[in-house]
Amino acid sequence: MVGGKRKGFSSHRKMIFQRKYRFLNIQDSWRYIWIVIGISVTLCSFFICKNDSDLVSVKVRFQNRAWAEPVKVEQRLPGIPGLTAKDCGSCHEEHYQEWKVSTHANAFTDLQFQAELSKPNSPQWLCLNCHIPLSGQRKEIATHLKDGDVFQPVLVPNKKFNAQWEKEGISCGTCHLKSDSEGNTILIGPTGANAPHPVEKNREALHARCNDCHNQDYKLNMSLVCYFKTGDEYKESIHFPKEDCVSCHMPSINRSVVLSSFNKEKRNSHRHTFIGSGVPKTFELFDAQWKGYQSGLKVEEPRWSFIKNENARLNLTIENSFAGHSVPTGDPERHLLIEAVLQSSNGKEIARKVQKIGQSWKWYPEAKLVDDNRILSGEKRKLVLNLKIDRDSLPAFGILRILHVRLTKENAEHMRKNAKNAPSEIGEKLKQIEKHYPYSNVFYESKTDLKTGKIRLTSKSDLLSASKRGNL
Ligand code: HEC
Ligand code: HEC
Ligand code: HEC
Ligand code: HEC
Ligand code: HEC
């Protein structure tokens, strides 16, 4: 470098140039670093911005869907200590006791629900929007979806989470609470009665609430659909509009609606048991639910006949007289099983034929309703079941049983296999699912003496006992 100085300007210049060049070299590597940093920052911010712009708000993704977001309610109302069902129950004791045995009160703790929720690919936030719909019941709240994908929610922790409320499932507030535009909690009642808490009179809103969950139809992806059409079925029903969801599932009763210490007159009130299928969520709840349970079907006397000693035939007429929708309705898995059984004189089974009434879905590769033979409201259905019998066996009795199935044995086995994914307490129960979860009930049974033609109907209390034993 020194020599270069002596060699003249040019070389000096060259040297300086070289030095400068070298210096520039050093600067350049920094520049490169800066350039790299710059590009990275730009790219990152581009991706962040891109992600930001691809965050779709849940409200926008599911417009006009009541279940897109939890119902926001402040956890305060003047005049009462709290808003959980237990709080309401401190004055509305009978309502609370009735609701407690309902399926609504079990919508979160339900083993089947918990099993499905713990599947690795479950869009939990969405399930919870219908099964625990009040904001205070939620540990986390989904505000946005990445790329609009229901399986990639942005979950915000909820400081106002109330664990007691979470367990209550479809709690009182699901139907009775909402917020006004300023965020104040409103309690909705049918008459606007004078109470310690404010009441906004809106009977119509209370009646309309059912369809927010029981009349929803949405395809989330190829194999996940939400398909409850009970509200649409109701509009086509023979009971429309004289009866509605509330008049059938919350029968009227004249009583005081609060503790007697309030000295309130008796008034028009409604049972809050919401009895439907008569298949409760636990065996313990059978007794309470069967007090108000009625099948939707009128079953006429079975007629057994024989053709050439080799074939037996059961002719049966059933009519959906009492339900304001199809039987069964709601959950696609629900179905009826009509069992025709021939027995020898010593009770040995000789032949059996089973017919299913319900929806049939193909789930893969794409969810599709492939068949639906449910009985429409008002429909009278004639059924024929043919049974083959051995030449040497002589049937003495013809037995007809009708089951209402909530959970199939196949799905119960899936639940058992997936028990390891669930929280341990639930997992333990899932391993012995048949002990904890009623799969079905038997709501009709008759035994025909084929010689005399005499028919013996099983009593409701014996049907209850058989249903409670499980293993149907
Ligand atoms: C401190 C006692 C008390 C508590 C707690 C309470 N209520 Fe009430 N509530 C009353 C009284 C008293 C009435 C008036 C009854 C009457 O006039 O027959 C009433 C009336 C009602 C009515 C009927 C209003 C109408 O329009 O006819 C509804 C609905 C109701 N309460 C819901 C609730 C709910 C839901 C909760 C819990 C969030 C709750 N209440 C908590 C005392 C209470
Ligand atoms: C926020 C959603 C929601 C609303 C609103 C709602 N339900 Fe439900 N309902 C459910 C869920 C979820 C279940 C099932 C819970 C389970 O099986 O674990 C259910 C179960 C039922 C059942 C029992 C079905 C059976 O299997 O026996 C009846 C009956 C019923 N609801 C009637 C009503 C009526 C009537 C209304 C309106 C007054 C109503 N529901 C409002 C979500 C709702
Ligand atoms: C005319 C009376 C009537 C009306 C109206 C009515 N239901 Fe029902 N519902 C019944 C009867 C009866 C059953 C029992 C059906 C059975 O299991 O045979 C039933 C069963 C159900 C079930 C249990 C599903 C099943 O089949 O296992 C649900 C859920 C239900 N109803 C919801 C509703 C909703 C929501 C509405 C309003 C859109 C409604 N119901 C209107 C009488 C009625
Ligand atoms: C699934 C919706 C739903 C849930 C959950 C619910 N209610 Fe109601 N409630 C109604 C409807 C609908 C009416 C009004 C019926 C009418 O007047 O036509 C009502 C009426 C009432 C009334 C007025 C008196 C009566 O019996 O008609 C009181 C009080 C009441 N509810 C308290 C409660 C309490 C307390 C809880 C929780 C333990 C509760 N409700 C849960 C739907 C619900
Ligand atoms: C639009 C509201 C809604 C959403 C969203 C929803 N459910 Fe439900 N769910 C219901 C209603 C209503 C019933 C009761 C149907 C009936 O009884 O006819 C029910 C019943 C059930 C049952 C009980 C079925 C039975 O026969 O006992 C399970 C399990 C269940 N839901 C799981 C889920 C899971 C898992 C998700 C999320 C993938 C989910 N639900 C999302 C409304 C909803």
Image (spheres, rainbow, N blue to C red):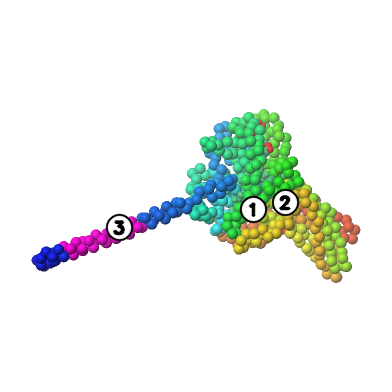
* Magenta span: chief secondary structure: helix
Left or right of 436 on screen, residue 134: left
Query: Is residue 35 rendered magenta in the image?
Result: yes
x and y percentages locating residue 79 in the rendered image: 57, 32
Residue 396 sits above or below residue 51 on the image: below
Q: Where is mark 3, residue-wise?
A: 34
Q: Where is mark 2, residue-wise?
A: 326
Residue drawn at x 58%, y 40% as measured from the top left: 84
Residue range highlighted in magenta: 16-40
Instruction: Say if mark 2 contacts mark 1, CB within 8 Å.
Output: no
Estimate the spatial distance between the alpha carbons at disc 2 and disc 1, rounded to whole Å: 14 Å
Q: Can residue 443 be seen in this view?
A: yes
x and y percentages locating residue 266 in the rendered image: 71, 32
Label 2 CA crowd tier, 10 Å (few <14, some 14–19, many 20+): many
Which is in the foreground here, disc 2 or disc 3? 3
Task: Say which label, 2 or 1, has the lower sequence index.
Answer: 1
Disc 2 under 8 Å from ligand 3? The reply is yes
Q: Where is mark 1, residue-wise?
A: 227
Q: What residue type is labelled 1?
A: Tyr
x and y percentages locating residue 255 in the rendered image: 71, 34
Tell me which corner region of the image, top left, top right, bottom left or bottom right, holds residue 424: bottom right
